[in-house]
Image: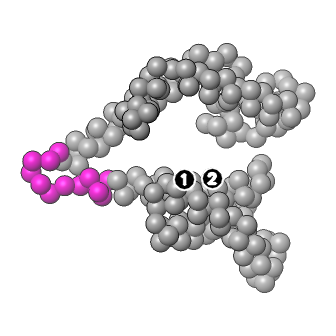
């Protein structure tokens, strides 16, 4: 339908737009965005989706809804990064310069990366491989099943779920995580 003529393409995009609208709006609004931010991000998302399909970059490894959500999430994160950089740009001589803030942001991200690595190290080797393949390398369950020697995709999906649950338990029992929550939310 999306690769058809203008009329069928237009109907398909309209259907995709309506089906995903609430989910993406929740992502943006719950993330601190305004209705205008949602409109901008969602418009850009649909354009990226359309270009991906027309240019044959969408490979159907996931549903269109999953793909739309991933695009919107990445667009939202980029938006927040740009907004944060602009917000922290200061003309007051007593406040840190933008360069100092970028270095500080990098250090914070590096701490987050190190914390994530530390948590991942507590997982079994097969769990690390499955989660890194699925999340970081964005491989399909079919590719993961083949790499890991599983009989089929469902086994890979089940393994990923079990590994995610193990990681959640590790995270929730981590004193560092609890301290971070307390620092951020006072919990």
Extreme residue toward the left, this view: 93
Which label is found at residue 164? none
> Is 174 rendered above or below residue 106?
above
> Was residue 116 drawn as part of the magenta stretch in this picture?
no
Q: Main secondary structure of the magenta part?
A: loop
* Residue 10 found in image quarter: bottom right
Magenta segment range?
Answer: 85-96
> Which x, y percent locates residue 30?
52, 56
**Is residue 118 visible in this depiction of the protein?**
yes
* Residue 161 found in image quarter: top right
Question: Separation of disc 1 and disc 2 at Cα?
Answer: 6 Å
Q: Does the CB distance between marks 1 and 2 fall below 8 Å?
A: yes
Residue labelled with disc 2 = 70
Q: Secondary structure at mark 2?
A: helix
Which residue is at a point 85% across and 29% down the rendered structure image?
A: 155
> Which x, y percent locates residue 99?
23, 45
Which residue is at a point 18% across and 47% down the rendered structure image?
A: 97
- Tell me: 114 left or right of 12: left
Of 171 and 110, nearer the camera is: 171
Q: Secondary structure at mark 1?
A: helix
Total labels: the figure holds 2
Q: Residues within 10 Å of mark 1 (few under 14, many from 20)?
A: some
- Tell me: 84 left or right of 181: left
> Which x, y percent locates residue 185?
41, 38
Of 18 and 145, nearer the camera is: 18
**Is residue 109 visible in this depiction of the protein?**
no
Which residue is at a point 80% across and 34% down the rendered structure image?
A: 157
Q: Residues within 10 Å of mark 2 (few under 14, many from 20)?
A: some
Residue labelled with disc 1 = 74
> Was residue 90 drawn as part of the magenta stretch in this picture?
yes
Which residue is at a point 86% across and 34% down the rendered structure image?
A: 154
């Amino acid at each position: 339908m999306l690769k058809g003529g203008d009329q069928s393409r237009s109907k398909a995009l309209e259907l995709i737009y309506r089906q995903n609208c609430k989910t993406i709006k929740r992502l943006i609004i719950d993330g601190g965005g305004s209705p205008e931010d949602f409109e901008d991000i969602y418009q850009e998302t649909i354009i990226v989706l359309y270009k991906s399909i027309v240019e044959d970059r969408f490979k159907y490894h996931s549903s269109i809804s999953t793909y739309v959500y991933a695009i919107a999430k990445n667009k939202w994160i980029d938006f927040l990064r740009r907004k944060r950089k602009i917000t922290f740009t200061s003309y007051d001589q007593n406040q840190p310069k933008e360069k100092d803030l970028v270095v500080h942001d990098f250090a914070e991200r590096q701490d987050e990366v190190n914390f994530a690595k530390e948590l991942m190290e507590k997982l079994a080797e097969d769990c690390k491989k499955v989660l890194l393949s699925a999340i970081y390398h964005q491989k399909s369950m079919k590719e993961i099943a083949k790499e890991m020697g599983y009989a089929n995709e469902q086994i890979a999906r089940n393994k990923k779920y079990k590994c995610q649950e193990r990681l959640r338990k590790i995270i929730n029992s981590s004193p560092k995580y609890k301290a971070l929550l307390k620092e951020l939310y006072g919990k």
